[in-house]
């Protein structure tokens, strides 16, 4: 489509776009304009001071995938829909129920946007999208980091989660100069998942960290990883400098199961032998990313967790690097 037509469409009101959609049936045109407007809305809106009075509830209960657990892909899906609801003048309420665990997955760790509550049925609408048209880039620019940092305003832990975060932060990194490092292995290094960024090897990441650690004047390295082998190698390379949070490692069981049962195995399929494991392994995961966001600097491969740390940090890192090795085809 030529630029003149795009320019004309970009000045149409919502009612005019709706009329054009009915006539042309070209949903791609409408979605492109909606996406552009939504992106600008996110960039320019102060969600903390936004007036949300006298708004009908917009219920978010269907997403892009049947999420069983709280990952940052889930979180990004929800906040994209939250932004869409607010953009359309509604007050979002997240009522997504995990299909296998039968709980409100958002409320397991987060509070409702603006602590919204359900009201009478005649005051509710349903969110139009399963995933509102927002593109979360693999390697965000400075403007995109600023924009999505704004949207990560909705990372609001509930009281139990907030207490857990605060305890780990105080115990592990508070008052220290720390370089945050994330190494993502296991299912993220399987090339069958097209479009995912390729991850640096442990050896490559150690080499990059060694080069930057002195210049950054950091005394410690906070290592976020699900692989014990990464912890062992980093501890050997940087003795008495490695800090980790309390969490289970998955590499031994993951690679054993993948090699014997399934090539396409996800880390979420791995269970630990403890009560309420599904809850605690994702609480530990979220706490790990929260800690990463509070370090002085960040070096990592690009994945959902490292990008989330960038957004949660809100541009305060003294130095940050996402290692770009391309994506799996």
Image (cartoon, rainbow, N blue to C red):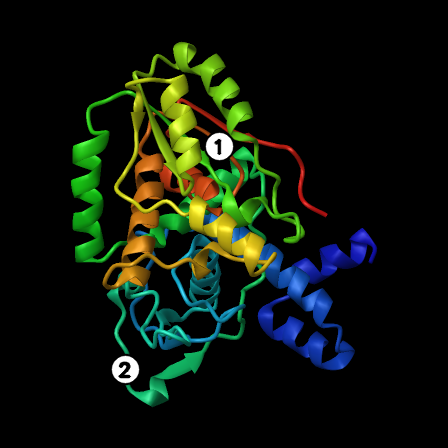
Residue 184 image position (x, y, % from top left): 48, 40
Q: CA distance from mark 1 to mark 2?
A: 43 Å
User: Which quadrant, please, contains the N terminus?
Assistant: bottom right
Q: Is residue 153 left or right of residue 142?
A: left
Q: Secondary structure at mark 2?
A: loop
Q: Is residue 117 left or right of residue 5?
A: left
Q: Is residue 303 above or below residue 77?
A: above
Q: Which residue is mark 2?
A: 119
Q: Which residue lies at the image location 68% right of the left edge and 78% below the top edge?
A: 19
Q: Secondary structure at mark 1?
A: strand
Q: Is residue 199 above or below residue 68?
A: above
Q: Which residue lies at the image location 79% right of the left edge and 59% below the top edge?
A: 5
Q: Which one is nearer the viewer's eye here, 33 or 293?
A: 293
- Disc 2 crowd rating (10 Å Cα; few below 14, some 14-19, many 20+) is few
Q: Which one is nearer the viewer's eye here, 5 or 269?
A: 269
Residue 51 image position (x, y, % from top left): 32, 61
Residue 236 falls in image quadrant: top left
- The single residue placed furthest to the top in the displayed view is 214
Q: Which one is nearer the viewer's eye here, 181 or 142?
A: 181
Can the viewer see residue 74 in this picture? Answer: yes
Residue 264 is marked as: none
Q: Which residue is mark 1?
A: 300
Q: Mark 1 vs mark 2: which is more N-terminal? A: 2
- Disc 1 crowd rating (10 Å Cα; few below 14, some 14-19, many 20+) is many
Q: Is residue 188 above or below residue 234?
A: below
Residue 116 falls in image quadrant: bottom left
Can the viewer see residue 110 in this picture? Answer: no
């Amino acid at each position: 489509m030529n630029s003149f037509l795009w320019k004309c469409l970009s000045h149409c009101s919502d009612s005019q776009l709706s009329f054009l959609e009915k006539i042309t049936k070209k949903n791609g045109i409408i979605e492109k304009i909606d996406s552009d407007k939504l992106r600008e809305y996110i960039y320019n809106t102060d969600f903390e001071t936004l007036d949300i009075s006298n708004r009908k509830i917009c219920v978010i209960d269907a997403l892009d995938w049947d999420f069983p657990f709280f990952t940052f892909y889930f979180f990004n899906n929800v906040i994209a829909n939250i932004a869409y609801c607010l953009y359309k003048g509604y007050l979002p309420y997240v009522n997504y129920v995990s299909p296998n665990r039968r709980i409100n997955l958002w409320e397991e760790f987060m509070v409702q946007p603006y602590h919204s509550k359900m009201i009478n049925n005649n005051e509710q609408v349903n969110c139009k999208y399963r995933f509102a048209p927002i593109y979360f880039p693999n390697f965000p620019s400075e403007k995109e980091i600023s924009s999505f940092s704004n949207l990560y305003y909705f990372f609001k832990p509930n009281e139990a989660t907030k207490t857990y975060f605060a305890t780990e932060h105080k115990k592990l990194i508070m008052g220290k100069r720390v370089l945050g490092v994330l190494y993502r292995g296991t299912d993220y290094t399987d090339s069958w998942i097209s479009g995912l960024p390729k991850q640096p090897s442990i050896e490559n990441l150690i080499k990059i960290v060694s080069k930057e650690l002195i210049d950054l004047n950091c005394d410690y390295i906070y290592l976020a990883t699900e692989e014990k082998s990464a912890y062992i190698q980093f501890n050997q390379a940087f003795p008495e400098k490695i800090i980790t949070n309390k969490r289970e490692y998955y590499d031994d069981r993951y690679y054993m199961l993948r090699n014997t049962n399934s090539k396409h195995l996800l880390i979420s399929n791995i269970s630990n032998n403890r009560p309420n494991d599904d809850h605690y392994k994702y609480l530990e995961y979220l706490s790990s990313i929260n800690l990463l966001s509070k370090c002085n600097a960040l070096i990592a491969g690009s994945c959902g967790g490292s990008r989330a740390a960038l957004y949660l940090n809100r541009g305060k890192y003294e130095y940050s690097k996402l290692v770009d090795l391309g994506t799996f085809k």
